[in-house]
Amino acid sequence: SAATSTGVTNCEAVWLGGNVVFTETVAATDCPVTTALGTYYSDQFYVFLTQGQSVTFLQSSTEFDAYLTLFRLDASGATVVAENDNGAGLTDAQITHIETAQFNIYGLDVGTAAAGQTGAYTLSMSPITGAPPVGTLGFAPRAGVRLGRLPARLSVPERRP
C-alpha cells in the first residue's frame, strides 16, 4: 500500500480504498487520450464495489476545468458508467455511483475538460457506504489508503466528441 502523499506519475494506476483526500497533478507525462480536439491528460485510479455500496468522487482545481469519467471494467473492456464536467459547481467535477450488480471493478479517469491542460487538482473519495451482500467477495481495502500501483495503463474508449 502507499500513503496518500505518494504521487501518481507517468500513467500509473492506483487502487483507492475510500475516504481519501489528496492533491495530485495532471502532467503531460500522464495518460494521454488523443481525439480530433487534441490530446487530454489524466491520472487513473481503481476501486472495487459490491452490490449496495456507494461512493462519491470529487475533483477540484484552480488551474483547469476538472473532468471525471467512471468506467466499469470487465471481460468485454471498459464501459463508461458516468462522466462529469461541472457537476460540483464552477469547474469542479463530481460523480456519485451506487453499485447494483453483485460486484464490479471500476476505473476512474481524473483529467481535464480541455485538451492540453495540465496542473494541480484535489481528488476526494467519500467513504464507501453500504454493506456488501452476504456471500460476496471479502475484498475490503483499508479506508484512507491508496492500494498499490499497477504498471499497465487503463485502456479506455474515447471520452469526448
Image (cartoon, helix red, strand yellow):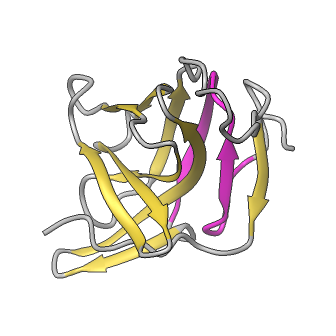
Q: Nearer the viewer, residue 141 or 30?
A: 141
Q: Residue at 83% across / 36% down in the picture? A: 3
Residue furthest out toward the front: 135
Residue furthest out toward the right: 1
Q: Is residue 141 left or right of residue 84?
A: right
On the image, the x and y values in percent for residue 75 come to 50, 74
Q: Residue at 66% across / 38% down in the picture? A: 136
Q: Nearer the viewer, residue 54 or 114?
A: 54
Q: Is residue 55 above or below residue 148?
A: above
Whether residue 14 appears in magenta in the rendering, the answer is yes
On the image, the x and y values in percent for residue 15 come to 68, 48
Q: Quadrant of the N terminus?
A: top right
Q: Residue at 55% across / 67% down in the picture? A: 30
Q: Is residue 71 left or right of residue 134?
A: left
Query: Which region shows up in magenta?
Result: 7-27
Q: Is residue 122 above or below residue 77?
A: above
Q: Nearer the viewer, residue 62 or 46?
A: 46
